[in-house]
Image: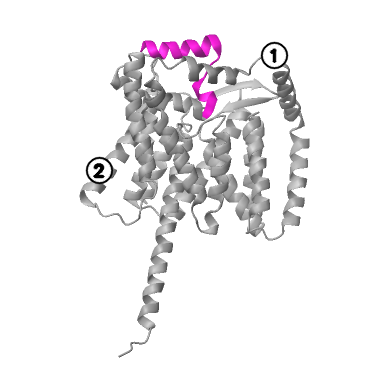
Amino acid sequence: MLRNISVFYILISASQFFWFALVPKNLILMVAFGAIMLMLVVVLLGLIYDPSRRFEQNFTYEISLIFISILLSTFGAKWGHDQNFMLTAWAQRMMYFYLFYFFLHTIRIRPEDLEKLIIIIAVIYIVIFLIQYVSYPRMLFGTRADEERGTIRIFLPAKAFVVMVYFYCLQEFFAKLKLKYALFCVAAIAVTILQGTRTPLALLFLGTIIMLILSKRVQSKMLIAFLLIVGAASIMVIFQDIFLNLLEVSEEQSAKEGDDIRVKAAKFFLYEFPPTPLNYIIGNGESHMASAYGMRIWYYKVDFGYFQNDIGLLGEYTKYGILYVIAVILIVRKILAMKIDPKYMYFKYYIFISLIGMIMGGIFARSDAFTTILAIMYIIDIDRHDKKYKYLEKKQKKLQTQPVHD
């Protein structure tokens, strides 16, 4: 029970979307910092008092690369932008949630319990979103909300939990045709539509089609395809005003001359932003508004509309350098290449869609998003350990039953 509570606390702290608008920001920061310290203490105690690892950690190398890139980026911020080390270290505090992978291995939570916690958070997310949507313009939660594109765009973090559980429920619905799984999928799509975001919506539909085609757990592909068509048509009718507004926005943006704002931002941060050749290797670090570096970043946002977070993996590269990019590529490749139990195949669909979405909005530098991937990595480790143990046990029994010849 204590394990589940601690994991739930860390996931909430990494997400930072369960806080009411009246809760002071400093308290939220303290809670997140407390979660980081909890993970650090537990991991260190585990290394001291329980150095033997029960499960093989298949992603230690990749996460170590990420921590090295975080460390090197503090030098990039100092040498390239004269921002002191402590300020950069604090600005990058949410990246320390990568300790979550080692924390899970230290406490050895059951994969089933971890999946349940993620499902609970995804359900709470949808409920909170709908409450805030109905309550608008009164803001109940500390998040940004804009009234545009024919809807109220509420930017609650931790949407990654919903997307991950969407693929889990979709897989279970394809295999079992139970209503509860379909209801969550519909709710997840509805929330995505209400947010007025085109790319995430397109990725959900793309992932659905790919899963329908490739999944071996689908009992009746014709029936599922029919239900999907009916469901998609119903969604189009219910949310037709939002879809029309999204089409209008797309037409307006395509009609504009010159490069898209994200393309301009990408060119700027790639070619003009790094002050030294070394910053192209170790990155520029995360900026903080208490320094001149942070004020310059704010100036780029306000005057030019250039946001590092809007250019996906490229923006993360400008912060954390080449080692970070290598680590991310290795993680994605390893997850997609590994053989896992069929009940965990939804991991691969989620990672594949995340890989495509990473180009537009990186997920490996947002603690509300990469904690789901760390959970996936941990569960894969357990799955591989169990398979290895069962294989060795089966081999040992076979050797014991063989006749002994003189």
Label 2 belongs to which residue?
44
In-front residue for pair 144/79: 79
Q: Which image quarter: residue 396? A: bottom left
Q: Residues within 10 Å of mark 2 (few under 14, many from 20)?
A: some
SS state under label 2: helix
Span colored in magenta: 291-312
In-front residue for pair 194/337: 337
Display coloring? one colour
* Residue 302 image position (x, y, % from top left): 52, 11
Label 1 belongs to which residue?
257
Of badges 2 and 1, the one in the foreground is: 1
On whether residue 308 falls in the magenta region, the answer is: yes
* Amino acid type at image mark 1: Glu
SS state under label 1: loop
* Amino acid type at image mark 2: Leu
Q: Left or right: where does residue 215 sit relative to residue 144?
A: right
Q: Left or right: where does residue 300 sit relative to residue 76?
A: right
